[in-house]
Image (cartoon, rainbow, N blue to C red):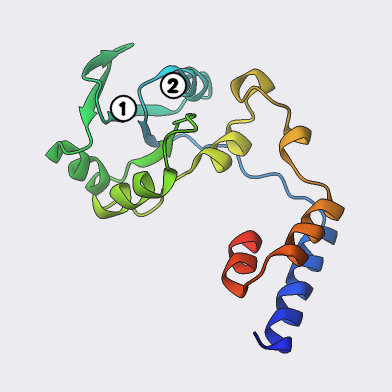
Amino acid sequence: MKDSSLASMRERLDGLLTAPRNDPEPFSAGRYVIYGAGSKGRETLSILRARGCDVTAFIDRSATGRIDGVPVVSVIDPAVAALAQDGCTPIVAVFNPGADPLPIHEQLERAGFRTVIGVVEARQRLAADDAYWLASTAAMTPSATDAAWLFDTLADDLSRATLLE
């Protein structure tokens, strides 16, 4: 590890920890698909509809049919690629500790979606109440001291870069 690389990453961390917080922009009226037809997917549908957003479909590994009038398509259905070509934006609404989000994002990107909104960004942009996530925003956000400690504890540049992202 180069000292200059670590120093530049440490400067970036310090900048992130001291920068004024900008709340993410809420979802604009647009066309969305929700990945995950379980309880969080259904809650996401309600929140988006209340904000005037159009939800075109659910994408799910195992569910089929319709939920509140919205079709549920399999992740391997050719309709998924068509949704990507039509300019829909997927929102991942899988809140399950057994579900790895990386393969979900990769699958959506392979289907042609240009932007994938993950669960953390969705939580921020939906401005859902804390019941949606079972914990308050404060409880899910590390303090600057904790973030700096974690950064200093990580053993390699890749881990530190991942933390910064």
Mark 2 neighbour density, 10 Å: few (under 14) some (14–19) many (20 or more): many
Mark linked to residue 45: 2
- Type of amino acid at the residue the image marks with label 1: Phe
Marks 2 and 1 close (CB-CB < 8 Å):
yes
Residue farthest toward the top in the current orientation of the protein? 68
Which of the two discs, 2 and 1, labels the residue nearer the N terminus? 2
Mark linked to residue 116: none
Q: Quadrant of the C terminus?
A: bottom right
Residue at image mark 1: 58
How far across and how far down the image is residue 132, in percent?
60, 21
26 to the left or right of 52 = right
90 to the left or right of 155 = left
Residue 128, quarter of picture: top right
How far across and how far down the image is residue 3, in percent?
73, 87
Is 14 situated above or below 58?
A: below
Number of callouts: 2
Is 156 situated above or below 112?
A: below
For label 1, the SS is: strand
Along the line of sight, which residue is nearer the eye, 162 or 27? 162
For label 2, the SS is: helix
Q: Residue at x 77, y 45 (%)?
A: 142
Q: Residue at x 16, y 37 (%)?
A: 79
